[in-house]
Amino acid sequence: MRCNKCDSEMKEKRSFGAIDYYCEKCGNSFTCIFSEEIELDENEYELKLEKNEPSSNNIKIISKICNCNFIQAREIIVNNSSIFKGKAVIIMDIKNELDNNNIKYSISPSFNY
Ligand SMILES: [Zn+2]
């Protein structure tokens, strides 16, 4: 997302049901509310890791998401385990965190947000 005032890349922060955009250059900010569709989505999604290096950064991220220690997090990465089952709005937050850290994963059923 680019700033509509100064055209620099904006920082984004996702929280439940919304994304906050903030421009560090000029201080411009706005919030995007997710469509109701995602909040009303009753599907249970499963998020599973694909092949990733058990690097110290990846281990740190996974241990944070799964709320487990580094040894368990390393096991999860090495075994390409499932890390979360639940509703779309929460999957969205985890997906964003994984994308930011280039961690590969798959979501089933297909996740269209
Ligand atoms: Zn700006």
Image: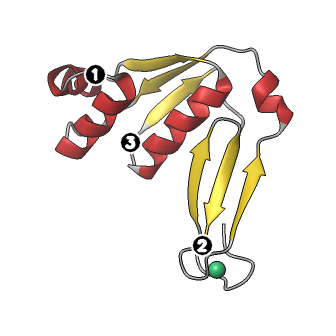
Tell me where residue 91 appears, x and y as whole percent.
Answer: 57, 29
Tell me where residue 58 sits by quadrant: top left
Three-letter amino acid code at disc 3?
Ile
Tell me where residue 109 sits by quadrant: top right
State the residue lying farthest toward the front.
27
Give the quadrant of ligand 1.
bottom right
Quadrant containing the C terminus is top right
Three-letter amino acid code at disc 1?
Ile
Query: Measuring 73% from the left and 55% from the top, which residue is drawn there?
Result: 31
Q: Count residues near mark 2 (Cα–Cα under 10 Å), then give few for <14, some for 14-19, many for 20+.
A: many
Query: Measuring 60% from the left and 35% from the top, which residue is drawn there?
Result: 92
Query: Measuring 21% from the left and 21% from the top, which residue is drawn there?
Result: 75
Q: Earlier in the sequence, mark 1 or mark 2?
A: 2
Tell me where residue 10 appears, x and y as whole percent.
Answer: 59, 69
Q: Is mark 2 within 8 Å of ligand 1?
A: yes
Residue contact at pointers 1 and 2, CB within 8 angstroms: no
Asked if one can make out residue 110 in the rendered structure from this viewpoint, the answer is: no
The residue labelled by disc 3 is 103
Q: Count residues near mark 1 (Cα–Cα under 10 Å), then give few for <14, some for 14-19, many for 20+.
A: many
45 with respect to 60 (left or right): right
* Element carrying mark 2: loop
> Closer to the observer: label 1 or label 2?
2
Q: Label 1, label 2: how many angstroms apart (C-alpha)?
A: 36 Å
Q: Earlier in the sequence, mark 3 or mark 2?
A: 2
Residue contact at pointers 3 and 2, CB within 8 angstroms: no
The residue labelled by disc 2 is 23
The residue labelled by disc 1 is 76
